[in-house]
Image (cartoon, rainbow, N blue to C red):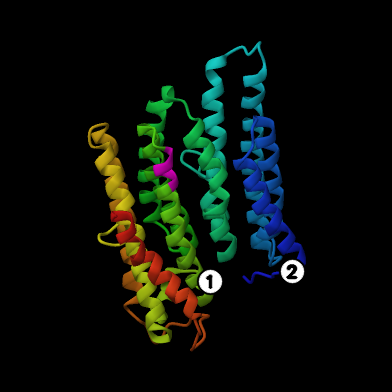
Amino acid sequence: MSFMWSPATMLAMSTLITSTMMALSSTNWMFLWASMELNLLSFIPILMSSKSNQETEGSIKYFLAQALGSALLLTSSIMMWSPYTPIPTLIAPILMVSVLLKLGSAPCHFWYPSVMSSISWISCTILSSWQKLAPLMILVFFTKQSLNSLIMLMAGMNALIGGIMGMNQSQLRSIMAYSSIGHLGWMMSFMLLNKPMMSLLYFTIYCSLIIPLFMLLNTMNLTTSKQLSKIMLISPITQLLISILLISLAGLPPLTGFMPKMLAIMMLANYSTPLIIMLIIGSLMNLFFYLNIIINTMAPNQNMSTNLPKYIKVPNMLLLLSSATSMGLAPIIML
């Protein structure tokens, strides 16, 4: 699926960036809701950039899920304003469910892998990084401490569901979707400690790893894990960098992805041991399907028919970005 940088797509991209910045800088809930609605409407043309039936189906699923999340967000904001709210204790849970739905977080995650598997790698990159910024900031900065037990449950559920469901997938986009759900559990764990900036740091590091990874997979035009077996024959450097990025996402030391997980475990050590166990078990299951992808790249099959050309020129800047993000950020975080 190709991504056409038409003037309409460029306009949608600019509106997408502007609407997210408006949401982050909003001063009331109605303006926040309007900004996120604009963000939703500007992302739909990007999803449908290649005009294929599969992307059209994915954009409809995305619209329905986001529209439901926006409706719940609007409902909770109106309940905050109304002096005659019948059940005021429901405001915070409704707000949290609306944000979880927009994030694609468990247990409201059912639309997320389906949409990811239907769209292009460029759209997957935007959906997994930029589109999560505003909902994540709402979640980490506005969630009440009275919901700590619910947040702990959601964090553990994200880690376990992301690991268990990801082990049953063969499509790379679905695997990356469940991987994203698993990483959301780690981001939410910092909310228990009232450390919103740590959640933002984890999200920044996660984005710095998936963006070059998705760009490499887009350049190689890969869709299934079986196609990875020809990367070694086409571009050994790309195969090495994809493997390093996946291991870094898994959180193995001393790569970049290990540092935020180590910080989370150290901070949660005196707070919740069961949550640490759930996060580590989910991370181990993530490591299982990451290693499965890496093993596929190291076992080339000459006779397998794929859509990959015999030679692909990967931009040097992309290779440099991949190596820098997977290994170069670790010393900075340690300092």
Q: Report whether 29 appears left or right of 334.
A: right
Quarter of image, res 57: bottom right
**Residue 218, label in figure:** 1
Q: Report whether 48 appears left or right of 172.
A: right
Q: Find residue 214 and report its horizontal and vertical position in percent.
A: 49, 66
Q: Earlier in the sequence, mark 2 or mark 1?
A: 2
Q: In terms of depth relative to the viewer, which is nearer, 90 or 308? A: 90
Q: In terms of depth relative to the viewer, which is nearer, 89 or 119? A: 89
Q: Name the residue under label 2.
A: 6
Residue 289 in view, yes or no: no
Q: In terms of depth relative to the viewer, which is nearer, 43 or 156? A: 43
Q: Residue furthest bottom?
A: 310
Q: Nearer the viewer, mark 2 or mark 1?
A: 2
Q: Which amino acid does label 1 sit on?
A: Asn
Q: Residue at x 42, y 73 (%)?
A: 226
Numbered range of the magenta stretch: 196-200
Dot 1: element: helix
Dot 2: element: loop
Q: Are marks 2 and 1 in contact (CB under 8 Å)?
A: no
Residue 165 in view, yes or no: yes
